Image (cartoon, rainbow, N blue to C red):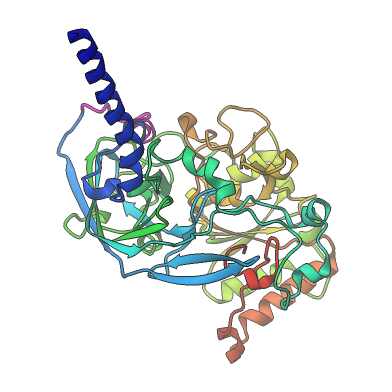
Amino acid sequence: MKEQKWNKFIKIVISIFLALCFILPATTATPYTDQHLPLSTIEQQTLTDQQTKGMAMMGDFDDPIELVYTYDFSEPTITEYYVDEELYHVVTCDELPLIGKQGKPILPVQPVNILLPQRGVIQSIHVDYENKISLGTGFHVPFGQEPSFYDFIEEIYEVTPADFDDTSTSSSREFPSIEDHLEHYYEDVWPWAPVIYPKYLYTTLDSYFCRGFEIYTLHLNPVHYVYHTKQLYYYDSITVTLTVTETGEISPRFRGLACDQSYVSMDVDIDDSFDMMESYDEYYTEGGKTGSLTDPTGHYPYVIITTTDLMYAQGDYAFQDLVNYKQDQGTPATIVTIEDIISTYDGVDTEEKIRKFIIDAYDEWETNYVLLGADHDDLPARILYLDIDGMYESEKYVPSDLYYACLDGSYNSDGDSKWGETTDGDDGGDVDLRAEVFVGRAPVETDQELSNFVEKTLTYAETSHAYLEKVLLVGEYLFGPATHFPLYW
């Protein structure tokens, strides 16, 4: 008899437990952010790996510095859009960029760039909030779409001209619904309902150097979405606290120039309680230039790299006319040929030799501007590898001159055929994504093309017409009618 009662009791307990498992997720609408959020184990390990490789051990806490930054947010605006007769709610806030990975909700994000002290090593990070505010329920937030290359659209989706007519109300392409993306959505959220995105108040990107100054970059997530209730929340204030020690390394790209300090200051947040810029007072003493083209007594902020044939082009205008104009404006400039670079520098290919020269020019000549004066055949761009889900393998190889602008570390540390992978930086970290020099390209092949380019450049520089104050930035919609803005641009 006692055994029967005991078994009955066990069954009751199990029934109650199972009921709670089904009921609690469906009725609980309070996000995880009701509590302070420590770094997750995964994020904490990632931070440790990225910030301390080759630097101080984590036990070295000599004179830690606490940096505090607070970001305030207005109430988001919600705008309704119809796509193929399906209603979507686009969330915007304080002109913040909208970011949504493939299969994830598109929401406002606050990019944060924090200047660290010289030799800075992050020991801990804490992100807190104030005033979680509900915006209501019933919102259908659009999800990030699969990337598509424009020249593949017709082949894959058989798009007709009518599909791009502004007056069209629908498209022949089948647009993925919210439900289609649930599989991706669950990959980055807690395994129990309610499903909330983003999972954390912030996303750590990485720490990069820019002209020798170290900048820590992260994204704050002021708006969160609960899928099951179609609920939106936002936080009107988020505070970031970093604990930093000055136990790391000095960047070899630090030059100590006033122009570098001004350049970096335009893009970073600086804690006023600590004189961050004054902490940068040491210079890298190891290594040195790798070629003999850059005389250290020279000073050329503006450098043109071109072929010997184009350097001596016989058109009405030549690169020397551009050099003369720059010098007349007070900017010393010079021309260097690709043939001289190839014969002077070592490297696995022409691209690496060019980058090594630009690094020497940056260090020795205080170069800030580089014009690549030839087409890809004569002055090749670096082909970078972008491993993005949903792209064909052939689409992942992208020509880019970013390789010539970002001068810290390697772009192929593993030495394979894929340059620019997220593990191709020093010590297996990400590649450098902050430019030391401004790089432009004149994609010219003939004397006439060169003459046209220089003439137009000089004419533009000398024009003071009011129309120059009106700028039109043209974008291309990836698919669907233009009336679908902003979901598919």
Give above or below for 451 relative to 213: below
Residue farthest front in this picture: 1
Q: Give the camera-side residue of 239 and 89.
A: 89
The quadrant the C terminus occupies is: bottom right
Q: Is residue 55 a member of the stretch shown in magenta?
A: yes
Give the residue drawn at x 24%, y 56%. 69
Question: At which x and y percent is residue 340?
Answer: 70, 46
Residue at the image point whose x is 41% and y is 47% from the top: 209
Residue 281 visible? The answer is no
Magenta run includes residue 57:
yes
Residue 274 visible in the picture: yes
Q: State the residue at coordinates (54%, 36%).
A: 410
Q: Nearer the viewer, residue 281 or 441?
A: 441
Quarter the N terminus occupies: top left
Q: Whole-percent x and y of residue 106? A: 49, 57
Viewer-proximal residue, 427 or 448? 427
> In which quadrant of the rendered view does residue 313 lie?
bottom right
Q: Residue at x 18, y 54 (%)?
A: 274
Residue 428 in the image, given as x and y percentages of width and height: 49, 30
Give the number of callouts.
Answer: 0
- In the rendered structure, which segment of residues is drawn in magenta? 44-59
**On the rendered structure, is 395 left or right of 71?**
right
Q: Residue 330 vs residue 189: left or right? A: right
